[in-house]
Amino acid sequence: MKSKFYLAIFLCSVIAFLSGCNKDIELSEQLTATNPTDLDVDAETWKSVDPDVITLPKITNIVENSSPVVFSQTPKAVDDPAYIAELLRLKLYKAI
């Protein structure tokens, strides 16, 4: 009984493999090349980063000692009028 089941699975797999392998992929999207709108004629006058001004220790110090603006504010109390006004404003925007 098991051998018939495995034979049927094998034959189905072979048929699926043979029927699916000879198809070509058709392009569904025709892409066009883009042209630049402006040549940057002043590109060679750009200033490079001065290695004495921006160094890895300075960057590391800034990253380690700064916190995102999102977390710099303390949460407002739920009965704070400004908080309630903000919630009402959000509810109005959601209702529109």
Image (cartoon, grey):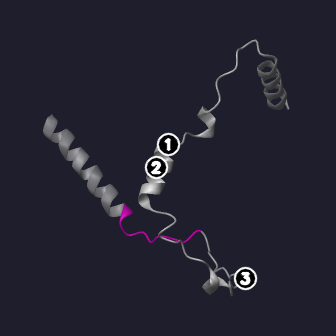
Q: Residue at x 47, y 56 (%)?
A: 58
5 or 17: nearer the viewer: 17
Q: Residue at x 62, y 79 (%)?
A: 46
Q: Check whether the beta carbons of the residues at disc 1 and disc 3 lie within 8 A of each other.
A: no
Identify the mark at residue 65; answer none if there is no mark. 1
What distance separates the C-alpha of mark 1 from that of mark 2?
6 Å
| Circle 2 Cα neighbour tier, 10 Å, few/some/many (<14 / 14–19 / ≥20) | few
Q: Secondary structure at mark 1?
A: helix
Q: Is residue 31 left or right of residue 53?
A: right
Q: Secondary structure at mark 3?
A: loop
Q: Residue at x 79, y 18 (%)?
A: 84
Taking the magenta stretch, the answer to whether it contains residue 22 is yes
Identify the mark at residue 61; answer none if there is no mark. 2
Q: Is residue 92 left or right of residue 44?
A: right
Q: Secondary structure at mark 2?
A: helix
Q: Which residue is mark 3?
A: 38
Q: Is residue 83 left or right of residue 10?
A: right
For the magenta stretch, what is the residue range?
Answer: 20-28
Q: Check whether the beta carbons of the residues at disc 1 and disc 2 lie within 8 A of each other.
A: yes
Taking the magenta stretch, the answer to whether it contains residue 38 is no
Locate residue 79: give its quadrant. Answer: top right
Q: Is residue 30 left or right of residue 83?
A: left
Q: Residue at x 65, y 22 (%)?
A: 75
Locate residue 41: give its quadrant. Answer: bottom right
The secondary structure that most of the magenta stretch takes on is: loop
